[in-house]
Image: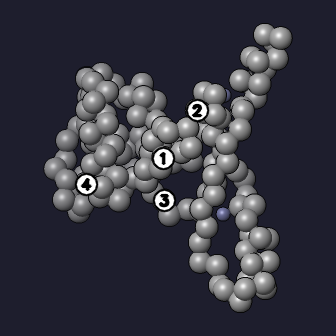
Amino acid sequence: MSENVLDDLLRKNGLKVTKGRKEVLKLMEEKKDLPMKAEQVYDLIPRSVCASLSTVYRILNQLSEKGLLKSMLYQNGIMYYQYDSGEHRHYIVCSKCGKVAALENCPMDAFDNYIRKDTGFDITGHIFELTGICPDCKEHAESRE
Ligand SMILES: [Zn+2]
Ligand SMILES: [Zn+2]
C-alpha cells in the first residue's frame, strides 16, 4: 500500500495522518494474513515512530474503531488485531504461548450445507474458535519429561 493510499484511508475515516498511524496501518496491511497482539506490533514498529506500547495500543484501538482493523478477543483473553480485508479466515490459537496460525480452508462449509438441509435456513455467517497447543510448545513439554 503506497503512502498516498494510506493517507487517504486515514483521512477518509476521519483520522489525522500521523507517522504512527501510518506505520501501524502499513504494517497491519502487510501482515494481513495473521492477527497480531499489540506487543508484536510494538516490536515491529521503529521506536522513532512509536516510543511506547501504550501509543501502539491507542493507535490499534483507533484504527479498530474506524473499522480499518478487526480486533478479536481470543479465548486466552488476549486481544488480537488484524487488517480488515473482508476475507473469510479461521485461526487456531496456542493456549500456551498465544501463537496464531491460519487455516487453509473453512472447515465449516460442509457443516453449513448440513444445517441448511436440516433447518431450511440459509447460513449467512459463522464464528468459530479453535484453541490448541502449537508444535513448539508441544516439543517443549515433551523434552521436559
Ligand atoms: Zn505455543
Ligand atoms: Zn468459515
Q: Which residue is mark 2?
A: 98
Q: Which mark is first along the chain, 3 or 2?
A: 3
* Residue in the image at 59% along x and 77% along y: 124
Against 138, residue 27 (above or below) is below
Give the Cα distance between marks 3 and 1: 18 Å
Q: Nearer the viewer, mark 1 or mark 4?
A: 1
Q: Which mark is first along the chain, 2 or 1?
A: 1
Q: Which mark is residue 93?
A: none
Q: Nearer the viewer, mark 2 or mark 3?
A: 2
Give the Cα distance between marks 2 and 3: 22 Å
Q: Which mark is first along the chain, 1 or 3?
A: 1
Q: Which residue is mark 1?
A: 73
Q: Nearer the viewer, mark 3 or mark 1?
A: 1
The quarter of the rendering in which ligand 2 is drawn is bottom right
Q: Which mark is first along the chain, 4 or 1?
A: 4
Against 113, residue 29 (above or below) is above
- Which element carries disc 4, helix, strand or loop? helix
Give the Cα distance between marks 2 and 4: 30 Å
Give the Cα distance between marks 1 and 2: 12 Å
Instruction: Please state if 134 lies on the left or on the right of 60 as rendered.
Output: right
* Residue in the image at 24% along x and 60% along y: 13
